[in-house]
Image (tube, helix red, strand yellow):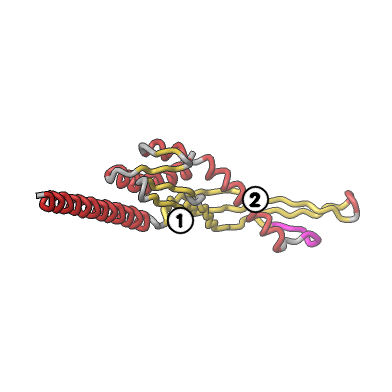
Amino acid sequence: MKRVLVGAVIALASVLIYKSCADDREQKSILEESSMLIQQELRNVSKLVVTEGHFAEVYNYKDSKELFGPLVTAHKKALVVVNADVTIAYDLSKIDYDVNEGNKVLTITQIPEPEIKISPDFEYYDVTADYLNPFNAGDYNAIKRNVNASLMKKIEASSLRSNAENRLVSELSRILVLTNTMGWTLVYENVPVENSEQLKTFLD
């Protein structure tokens, strides 16, 4: 009778151990699948998020050069009309992140800075210069630098950057929805992210 009882206890223990191991393997498999799915979604959004705009600028360029002291001055000037296409892009392939399977936490450690590209088209009018102060490469480079600086101020004052951020938040929200659906936590700057509006505040 004792042998039968001992055998039953051993059999029950074996069943419990087997079931526990099977549950552990199943839980580990689910976590691995969840991790793979999250990383796949991160690869899916790894693209350039681009916002485009157009700006126009009219620029008056003037330069004077003293010859033989202040008695003689040579002048040059130009009227420049600039039409520029501007793009603001986020390369999401540069997102850095960490996946913690045990705690079911996806931590975004870095979001790339926006890449601003200005493609200006210059048209020169009323270009005049004295013989002793002609236009040269330095003048054209100075015009380009000044125009680009002016265009950058217009870009910052426009809604182009905020539109680009909204596009970025839209892409990141896909990751937020996935983690929430799977019972994971999305963390950025050591703070759990609960909604898209919170994501936007991190970028402002």
In the image shown, does 96 or 117 lie closer to the viewer?
96
Q: Position of residue 158 (x, y in %)?
A: 49, 41
- Where in the figure is residue 116, as x and y percent of width and height? 52, 52
Q: Looking at the picture, does residue 143 appear above or below residue 136? A: above
Q: Which residues are magenta?
A: 128-133
For marks 1 and 2, the one nearer the N-term is 1
Circle 2: residue type: Asn
Count of picture labels: 2
The image's mark for residue 146 is 2
Query: Residue at left 42%, top 53%?
Result: 50
Q: In the picture shown, does residue 197 fall above or below 60? A: above
The residue where tag 1 is placed is 91
Give the CA separation, mark 1 to mark 2.
28 Å
Asked whether 42 or 187 is in front, the reply is 187
Asked if the residue at tag 2 contacts the one at tag 1, i.e. Cβ–Cβ closer than 8 Å, the answer is no
The quarter of the picture where residue 138 lies is bottom right
Identify the residue at the far left of this view: 1
Instruction: Look at the magenta stretch and give its main secondary structure.
Output: loop
Task: Give SS at disc 1.
Answer: strand
Residue drawn at x 63%, y 55% as measured from the top left: 144
Residue density around tag 1, few if under 14, some if 14–19, many if 20 or more, within 10 Å: some
73 on left or right of 97: right
- Residue at the image point whose x is 77% and y is 58% from the top: 130
Residue type beneath disc 1: Asp
Q: Based on the picture, tell me whether residue 129 belongs to the magenta stretch.
A: yes
In the picture, measured across the screen, residue 73 lies left or right of residue 138, that is right
